[in-house]
Amino acid sequence: MAAGFYLSWRATRLDRLHHRVETARAALDAALLRRGSAVLDLVSADGLPADRARALADAATAARRAPEGERELAESALSRELRSVLGPLRATAHLRDHLTEVAGAARGVQLARTFHNDAVVDTRRARRSRLVRVLRLAGTAPLPDFFEIDDEPPAPPTGSDTL
């Protein structure tokens, strides 16, 4: 009887860990979409030079439309583009709110990715147990994957009224 209770507890724990991964992945997807929207709002704010705005818009659109297998690369490219465009940028009063929104969204992506990858670590650790593998307590749930992107946020622009 105790063995049955223990096995039931382990299976329930695995189920909760898999649910945690799914929830964290949904939060990560939402954070990535929020960052892409913030970038597109910044681009449409009419304060960036045309070449910088075009590069950011292209990167944000590519990240949003990337198929699942290529999404990590596209999101990393958007992160790099944000750093290259916003790093040397001097913030104007007109752009300051948009830049704050982009910076907040970039921090949100960083946090969401950390939570997701931590959930994946915990789930993989629980699934490595010999008992879980032998008795197939994880059922048919696929082994969760990490989401690895370059998510370093851009440096805050300097506070001048010129670009």
Image (tube, helix red, strand yellow):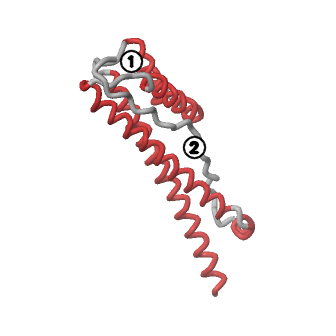
| Residue type, numbered disc 2 | Phe
Residue at numbered disc 1: 53
In the image: residue 69, left or right of residue 32: right
Q: How crowded is mark 2: few (under 14 residues within 10 Å), some or many (20 or more)?
A: some
Q: Residue furthest top?
A: 50
Mark 2 / mark 1, whichever is N-terminal: 1
At mark 1, the secondary structure is helix
| Residue type, numbered disc 1 | Ala
Above-or-below relation of 23 to 150:
below
Locate residue 158, reporting x and y percent.
36, 28
In the image: residue 72, left or right of residue 37: right
Residue at numbered disc 2: 147
Identify the residue at image location x=69%, y=67%. Answer: 132
Above-or-below relation of 136 to 82:
below
Q: Quadrant of residue 29?
A: top left
Circles 2 and 1: CB atoms closer than 8 Å: no
Q: In the image, which disc is placed on residue 2?
A: none
Frontmost of labels 2 and 1 is 1
Locate residue 12, reporting x and y percent.
55, 70
Q: How crowded is mark 1: few (under 14 residues within 10 Å), some or many (20 or more)?
A: many
Above-or-below relation of 7 to 100:
below
Identify the residue at image location x=55%, y=56%. Answer: 119
Q: Nearer the viewer, residue 4 or 36?
A: 36
Q: Residue furthest left?
A: 94
Above-or-below relation of 151 to 89:
below
Q: Mark 2 and mark 1: span between their CA atoms?
A: 27 Å
- Looking at the rendering, in which quadrant would you find the N terminus? bottom right
At mark 2, the secondary structure is loop
Identify the residue at image location x=63%, y=61%. Answer: 139
Locate residue 2, reporting x and y percent.
64, 86
Q: In which quarter of the image is residue 46?
A: top left
Q: Nearer the viewer, residue 111 or 25?
A: 111
